[in-house]
Amino acid sequence: MRLSARSEYGLLALVDLATAPDGAPLASRELSNTRGLPPAFLDQLLADLRRAGIVRATRGARGGFTLAREASAITALEIVEALEGPVAPSVCTPDVCGREGGCAAETVWSSVAAAVRDALSGFTLADLTDEQAQLDRAPLTCTPRRSE
């Protein structure tokens, strides 16, 4: 199980796609500029998300990317697994370590993976876009740094 910038950047790009006016396609360049994401890296993420059936690509002058389904039908778990692979222990499995009967550590890592899967399953892309909209409407406040 490994969570990286792929998940973070992918979630950010999908929030932007989900909030596009009238569901209009957004070019990867536009998504990259909006969030300050590396363009080539974002293109890789969008290709993975397209293969997973999360986004749809449209060619042409007004082309770009759109969500393939409603935001409420796409979970954070689905997004993370499309970008990172299965949320499961990466080393502590009988296939990797060779212990057929398992070991005590496997119980820990399986429980952790199950908790992460449950947490990610509890968020939809619609939840994230609603939260982002609330954050965007909130007034910005600056907290002065304390000198030590």
Image (tube, helix red, strand yellow):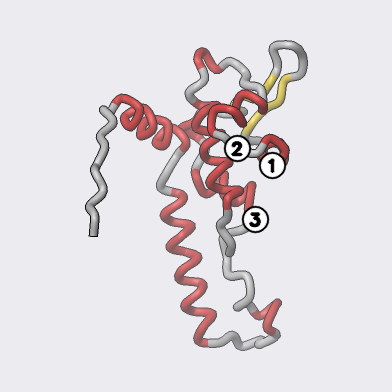
Task: Answer yes or no: is residue 50 visible.
Answer: no
Label 3 secondary element:
loop
Q: Residue at x 58, y 55 (%)?
A: 4
Which class describes the residues within 10 Å of circle 3: few (<14), some (14-19), or many (20+)? few
Image point (51%, 72%), residue name: 110
Label 1 SS = helix
**Label 1 is placed on what type of residue?**
Phe
Relative to the observer, which residue lies in front, 6 or 110?
6
The disc at residue 30 is none
Residue that mark 3 sits on = 85
Residue 106 drawn at (x, y percent): 54, 80
Q: Position of residue 148 (x, y in %)?
A: 23, 60
Residue at point 64%, 48% (across, down) = 83
Query: What amino acid type should be assigned to the residue bearing mark 2?
Result: Leu
Disc 2 crowd rating (10 Å Cα; few below 14, some 14-19, many 20+) is some
**Residue 42 appears in which quarter of the rendering?**
top right
Quadrant containing the N terminus is bottom right
* Amino acid type indicated by mark 3: Gly
Outermost residue, right side: 60
Circle 1/circle 2 CB separation < 8 Å:
yes
Label 1, on which residue? 41
Q: Position of residue 19 (x, y in %)?
A: 48, 23
Which residue does the numbered mark 2 point to in the structure image?
Answer: 37
